[in-house]
Image (cartoon, helix red, strand yellow):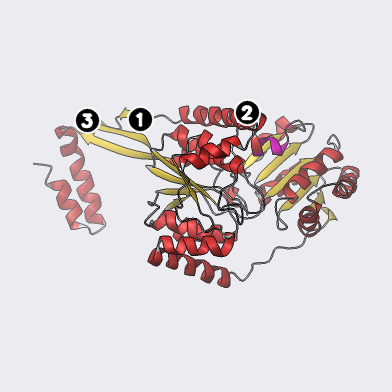
């Protein structure tokens, strides 16, 4: 392997101050409820609103601030996201009556969580697409109570109108103007104005992420996510200009975002570096993108496709782009990624907004053990069983013997009493 562009090594940060700060916020919300939420709203977003829940009048006013094309775009993207979530739901079937032995009837039901909160970031950019990505699969899963929250536009007291409209179109039942670690605490433990939920999903900054980590157990979460990532597997058939654009699309997210290329062609790798530098000259978000690219951009030259595949699986990226001539042969070899984008026509940004797959994906190598948010995130598979008298009496001696082997006399007795 040859390094054509080296990235700065990520080192474990001292997170004690972050943990302590978030713990203090969570404690304040638990003890002071809405007063703490209003305090943090004022402190972080210059928001002085008294009612945290967004009213129907505010939602309708948000529609008036969007033009017809903007609303139509949201509806079209939502249609694709919803259709795919509904198709995913159909793959999950119940088991009604499975009999491993005569008289033993087993099954499972697929049940939605009863409530969820969709956390929609609103810091540097109004990420209204995230509202669609979170609420649409929750709706397809049949969650009875779908809530959402987002920070207000600083100093306005209002959530960005596009975010509000996206939440409403996607089927959110309750919308709250609150963000940050304090929002996670409120939806985990509840306050006077906010009833707690069973599950919190969605990305956020390091404070939101740490709050989800600390509140997990009290509430369910999707996963703990970090800065955005893209990895491109490419050969000589790939277009350096297109690849550079995709790398910068991720780099503009955050100074800590990571964009990686693994290629079998040195000329392509060098051409991609040059294309990135050229495109940065005219990119409006170059201030952030250049920081990210300079610090964490990485281009690696490998000797074989197999070496490229092995590195990609080891990186376990959030987004994986495959722009190699023999892509279909390579796909079965890839097993660690949040979402896969096959061929140069399939821009990662299409998945970010409108093609239909979800953009809320695992980062920091979490794709080794989980996929992204999908309809199944909001569903539980719950088993049940029933037995005839004969089956109960037949299995009781086996269970009693196993229980006694573990030294659990009460378990054994509960089995043996059914032998009569």
Can residue 359 be seen at all in this image of the molecule?
A: no
Estimate how packed mark 2 is, as few (under 14), some (14 to 19) or many (20 or more) residues with alpha carbons within 10 Å: few
Q: Which residue is mark 1?
A: 95
Estimate how packed mark 1 is, as few (under 14), some (14 to 19) or many (20 or more) residues with alpha carbons within 10 Å: few
Which label number is shown at residue 247? Answer: none
Give the left or right position of residue 400, taking residue 366 as reference.
left
Decide: marks 2, 1 in contact (CB < 8 A)?
Answer: no
| Depth order, front residue of 375/353 | 353
Estimate how packed mark 3 is, as few (under 14), some (14 to 19) or many (20 or more) residues with alpha carbons within 10 Å: some
On whether residue 194 falls in the magenta region, the answer is no
Q: Tell us which disc is closer to us: 3 or 1.
A: 1
Q: Residue at x 77, y 36 (%)?
A: 323
Q: Which residue is mark 2?
A: 72
In the rendered picture of this protein, how many numbered marks are placed on residues? 3
| Depth order, front residue of 285/326 | 285
* Cα separation between marks 2 and 3: 56 Å
| Magenta residue span | 346-352
Can residue 155 be seen at all in this image of the molecule?
A: yes
Magenta segment main secondary structure: helix
Which label number is shown at residue 103? Answer: 3
First in sequence: mark 3 vs mark 1: 1
SS state under label 3:
loop
First in sequence: mark 2 vs mark 1: 2
Decide: marks 3, 1 in contact (CB < 8 A)?
Answer: no
Give residue 81's position: percent from left, percent from top.
Answer: 57, 32
Q: Residue at x 29, y 34 (%)?
A: 106
On whether residue 348 falls in the magenta region, the answer is yes
Give residue 380's position: percent from left, percent from top.
Answer: 39, 40
Task: Identify the image quadrant of residue 339.
Answer: top right
């Amino acid at each position: 392997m040859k390094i054509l562009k080296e990235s700065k090594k990520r080192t474990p940060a001292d997170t004690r101050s972050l943990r302590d700060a978030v713990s203090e916020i969570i404690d304040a919300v638990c003890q002071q409820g809405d007063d703490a939420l209003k305090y943090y709203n004022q402190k972080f977003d210059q928001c002085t609103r008294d009612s945290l829940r967004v009213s129907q009048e505010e939602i309708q006013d948000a529609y008036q601030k969007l033009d017809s094309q903007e609303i139509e775009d949201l509806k079209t993207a939502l249609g694709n996201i919803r259709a795919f979530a509904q198709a995913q739901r159909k793959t999950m079937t119940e088991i009604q009556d499975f009999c491993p032995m005569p008289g033993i009837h087993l099954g499972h039901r697929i049940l939605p969580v009863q409530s969820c909160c969709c956390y929609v970031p609103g810091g540097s950019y109004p990420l209204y697409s995230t509202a669609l990505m979170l609420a649409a699969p929750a709706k397809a899963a049949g969650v009875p109570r779908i809530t959402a929250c987002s920070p207000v536009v600083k100093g306005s007291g209002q959530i960005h109108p596009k975010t509000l409209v996206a939440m409403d179109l996607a089927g959110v039942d309750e919308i709250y103007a609150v963000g940050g670690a304090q929002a996670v605490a409120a939806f985990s433990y509840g306050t006077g104005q906010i009833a707690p939920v069973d599950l919190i999903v969605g990305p956020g900054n390091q404070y939101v992420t740490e709050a989800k980590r600390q509140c997990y157990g009290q509430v369910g979460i999707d996963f703990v996510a970090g800065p955005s990532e893209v990895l491109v597997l490419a050969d000589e058939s790939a277009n350096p200009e297109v690849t550079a654009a995709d790398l910068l699309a991720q780099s503009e997210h955050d100074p800590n975002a990571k964009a990686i290329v693994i290629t079998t062609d040195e000329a392509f790798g060098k051409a991609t570096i040059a294309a990135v530098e050229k495109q940065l000259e005219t990119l409006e978000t170059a201030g952030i993108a250049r920081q990210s690219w300079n610090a964490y951009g990485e281009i690696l030259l490998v000797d074989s496709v197999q070496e490229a595949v092995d590195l990609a699986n080891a990186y376990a990226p959030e987004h994986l782009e495959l722009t190699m001539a023999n892509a279909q042969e390579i796909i079965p070899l890839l097993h660690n990624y949040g979402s896969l984008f096959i061929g140069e026509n399939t821009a990662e940004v299409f998945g970010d907004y409108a093609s239909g797959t979800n953009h809320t994906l695992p980062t920091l190598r979490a794709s080794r053990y989980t996929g992204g948010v999908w309809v199944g995130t909001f569903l539980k598979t719950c088993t049940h069983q029933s037995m005839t008298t004969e089956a109960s009496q037949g299995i009781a001696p086996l269970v009693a013997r196993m229980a006694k082997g573990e030294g659990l006399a009460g378990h054994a007795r509960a089995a043996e009493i059914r032998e009569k």
